[in-house]
Image (cartoon, rainbow, N blue to C red):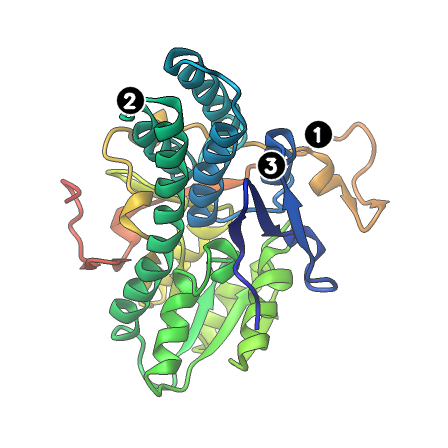
């Protein structure tokens, strides 16, 4: 059984280094904010809900390690730690959501000691809420999955992207738990292969049938009638689009063309009630992730590579958004 993706350990954090999967399942103990930030940037810790937990625990860790005697200095240190972590992944909204909840809890305290305790309690609460939230998402989503369904998913929105259970894969797990026979087609998810490395690993561990395809195979399988529905996660849902791993948008377009339901599974913490698509920064990652594969250069030196981490799927292509509170149906404007 896969352990929890991220958890508190004393005044530090322990997390699965997802860059080593599927060959090695290694837990990393982290007691340093710089190390946590590096883990987030390198995608050792990734997935919207898991980033929310990481942000919360990061601020709590900084709070516990603070030597400030007065609240003013303590809060200044906490805010600096928060902004340092917030800058690591600009597109995923959950990271800032977890950070802000812990900052607010600490800021409401009347002494440094009470603020430290409040930060830890709130971070633990966020982590505990995640499992219940994912279970509720799974329960609501399972009702949408027919018995015998062949589900397409993109990237990894499983337990590795949360603390456990998952959002999109939580829907699959809950459907299986309800007695339905479900199989999954996982897009490999270039360039870092989160579908091939992580989603397939999780489902194989659970004994759920899974096959891996190249991202560009999905439309062909839809045309052949081998996909019954698409279920993906999200890193931010605004009033007009759902941001998710790059490649999600083309699956939504293809699903609409072939009359296949396209569902987004995400907690309410992933909703952004303030910004629209054009106001959200889409993270661009290092060109080397595309230009180099397995230590070998595959793109000629000097040729430019564009490496967006996310794309935006217009909500008019989404059949339903599966949340812990139920399934939202179109039209989504205004977003409830």
Q: Nearer the viewer, mark 3 or mark 2?
A: 2
Q: Is residue 239 left or right of residue 304?
A: left
Q: Quadrant of residue 273?
A: top left
Disc 3 and disc 1 in contact, CB within 8 angstroms:
no
- Location of mark 1 (residue): 304
**Closer-to-camera residue (305/108):** 108
N-terminal label among 2 and 1: 2
User: Residue at the location (28% across, 71% down)?
Assistant: 139
Assign a secondary structure to mark 1. loop
**Closer-to-camera residue (200/217):** 200
Relative image position of residue 262 (x, y in whole percent): 33, 61
Question: Residue 148: which disc?
Answer: none
Assign a secondary structure to mark 3. helix
Relative image position of residue 135 (x, y in whole percent): 33, 66
Residue 287 vs 171, above or below: the answer is above
Q: Nearer the viewer, mark 2 or mark 1?
A: 2
Q: How many marks?
A: 3
How much space separates mark 3 and mark 2, taking CA atoms? 28 Å
């Amino acid at each position: 059984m896969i352990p929890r993706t991220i958890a508190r350990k004393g005044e530090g954090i322990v997390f699965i280094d997802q860059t080593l999967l599927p060959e090695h399942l290694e837990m990393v103990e982290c007691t340093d904010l710089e190390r946590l930030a590096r883990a987030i940037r390198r995608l050792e810790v990734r997935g919207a809900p898991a980033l929310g937990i990481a942000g919360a625990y990061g601020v709590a860790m900084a709070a516990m390690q603070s030597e400030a005697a007065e609240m003013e200095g303590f809060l200044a240190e906490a805010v600096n730690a928060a902004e340092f972590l917030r800058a690591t992944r600009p597109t995923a909204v959950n990271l800032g959501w977890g950070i802000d909840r812990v900052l607010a809890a600490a800021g409401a305290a009347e002494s440094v000691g009470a603020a430290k305790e409040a930060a830890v309690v709130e971070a633990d609460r966020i982590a505990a809420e995640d499992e219940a939230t994912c279970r509720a998402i799974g329960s609501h989503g399972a009702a949408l999955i027919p018995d015998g369904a062949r589900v397409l998913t993109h990237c990894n929105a499983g337990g590795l992207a949360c603390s456990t259970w998952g959002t999109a894969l939580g829907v699959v797990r809950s459907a299986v738990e309800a007695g339905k026979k479900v199989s999954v087609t996982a897009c490999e998810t270039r360039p870092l292969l989160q579908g091939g490395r992580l989603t397939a690993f999780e489902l194989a561990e659970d004994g759920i049938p899974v096959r891996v395809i190249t991202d560009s195979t999905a439309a062909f399988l839809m045309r052949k009638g081998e996909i019954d529905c698409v279920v993906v996660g999200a890193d931010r849902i605004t009033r007009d689009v759902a941001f998710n791993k790059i490649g999600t948008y083309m699956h939504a377009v293809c699903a609409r063309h072939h009359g296949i339901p396209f569902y987004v599974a995400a907690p309410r913490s992933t909703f952004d009630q303030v910004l629209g698509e054009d106001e959200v920064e889409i993270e661009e990652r290092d060109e080397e992730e595309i230009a180099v594969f397995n230590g070998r250069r595959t793109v000629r030196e000097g040729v430019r590579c564009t490496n967006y981490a996310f794309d935006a799927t217009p909500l008019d292509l989404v059949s339903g958004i599966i949340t812990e509170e139920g399934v939202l149906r179109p039209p989504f404007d205004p977003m409830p």
